[in-house]
Image: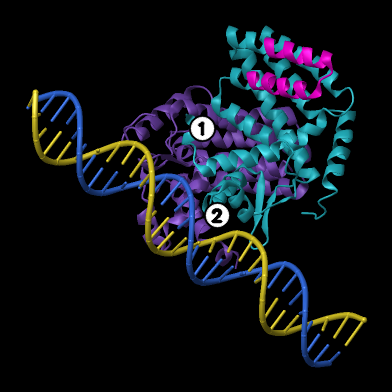
Chain colours: A purple, B cyan, C yellow, D blue
Amino acid sequence: MASTKRSNAQQLRDCLEDDIINGRRLPGERLDPDALGRAFNVSRTPVREAFQQLVASGLITVSPKKGTFVAKVGIDQLIEMFEVMAELEGMCGRLAARRISEPELAALRVAHERCEAAALAGDTDVYYYENETFHDCIYTASHNTFLASEARQLKQRLKPYRRLQLQVRQRMHNSLNEHHVIVEAIAKGDAALAQQALCDHVLIQGERFSDFVSSVRRMEAPAGQAG
Amino acid sequence: MASTKRSNAQQLRDCLEDDIINGRRLPGERLDPDALGRAFNVSRTPVREAFQQLVASGLITVSPKKGTFVAKVGIDQLIEMFEVMAELEGMCGRLAARRISEPELAALRVAHERCEAAALAGDTDVYYYENETFHDCIYTASHNTFLASEARQLKQRLKPYRRLQLQVRQRMHNSLNEHHVIVEAIAKGDAALAQQALCDHVLIQGERFSDFVSSVRRMEAPAGQAG
DNA sequence: GGGGCTATATTTGTATATCAGTGTATGTGA
DNA sequence: TCACATACACTGATATACAAATATAGCCCC
């Protein structure tokens, strides 16, 4: 019912957002307003609206008189964004350690167990999905809906690039171990530890990061133009 | 020259944003597209565009078939936002303590001195303005442009409510003392202290906060409708 | 007198047409 | 062969017209 009530512009926005986040449209790819309008049986007006909202989200960029493209964030900005993401996640963890309720803690444990199962099965895709749930539990448990919303939004924005993270060998297993520390810290109410553990978890600190950077560099290569 | 190139929609957006931030349009106030269009000699299309951008910024909300209104954030959400703002400011301070350059530190000191002068003169408005510059120096000094941009955006969103802060007696003087601690911490490169000091500075911790809340409550009263 | 239904008016959402500016491509001349 | 100028096409910006949906008010019936 709610879906029918969403305007065409909203639907188009959601669709494009999903496409970009899930890698069906790659950074640097051009978005043709006319083609999209035809594909969705709408005029250019709602397409424009959708574009504007995506620009505000930072997922696409419009170069005046040149066209609209899927945002391609440079390595430097990407690092900056991960730095902020780590801080937000850490803050969520800190607050969650203090504010989490019993049902929320139970949900967090369930999410962790599902991650474990996926890791044991070696299923990267499932792990990726369950990992989302795990982190979302922490956002919710922070009991700061604004913070949770900001964290989710930034995560969305990073999603096209995060996907590459887990492809790094052993990353999934390490990630799981970190999750364990996080869960226990939150369960014990150790705010400082939860914050630090989550922050580190996001930063992919140390040697992994350079691997990640090189992955992104490889991903950026096809599109070409710097900016 | 750059101003003439801005589209009408951008100009209108900037104007509305400024009006909202500076309290010329109060939370809950309705924005009539037709009236604005007439006032700016534009049609509804650019007005709509401006609206959408402001919605993305969180400064206004549009209720379908009901109207477009200046966003009215509830007390609970306001507290949440300040909690996040404090964290972001703290992060800026932490990074600034490690990364600030000599010219940036000099600029920060100048900004602090101007705050001091305004405080001595008892000029709240000037202090308010110089305070902006002071914090902006720290954002820049964090050398994380994404973080700086997010911090600025959130600050904009809180501005209609921050304005009330300094009206609390003695707040300006206390604020100045806190600034001193912050400057010294950054100058010494004490990241942890800078982070803590800035975080506390934003949170208006302790007894001041309840005063602030009551001020906001008074501000919310005229508009009426909850939600 | 009160409640429900209907009609109207208001408001957002969408479509289409037009305008202006810019980037690009092509052709011509040196 | 290269450079410059002109023309064309593409894109973004805006105006206007239209459609859909809802809130409100008024009226009628109970």
- Is residue B114 found inside the magenta-colored segment of the image? yes
In front: A46, or A154? Answer: A46
Residue visible at 44% across and 50% down in the picture: A19
Residue B196 sits above or below residue A219 on the image: above
Provide the residue span drawn in magenta: B110-138
Amino acid type for the residue under numbered disc 1: Ser
Residue B94 in picture, x, y percent from top left: 66, 19
Gap between marks 1 and 2 measured at Cα: 21 Å
Kind of residue sitting beneath label 2: Arg
Numbered mark located on residue B3 in the image: 1
Viewer-proximal residue among C5 and C27: C27
Residue A206 tag number? none
What is the number of the mark on residue B44? Answer: 2
Badge 1 marks a residue whose secondary structure is helix
Q: Nearer the viewer, residue A8 or A180?
A: A8
Which quarter of the picture shows residue B110? top right
Is C8 rendered above or below residue A159? below
Q: Label 2: few (<14), some or many (≥20) within 10 Å?
A: some
- Residue at 39% of width from left, 27% of height from top? A214
Q: Quadrant of the N terminus of chain A?
A: bottom right
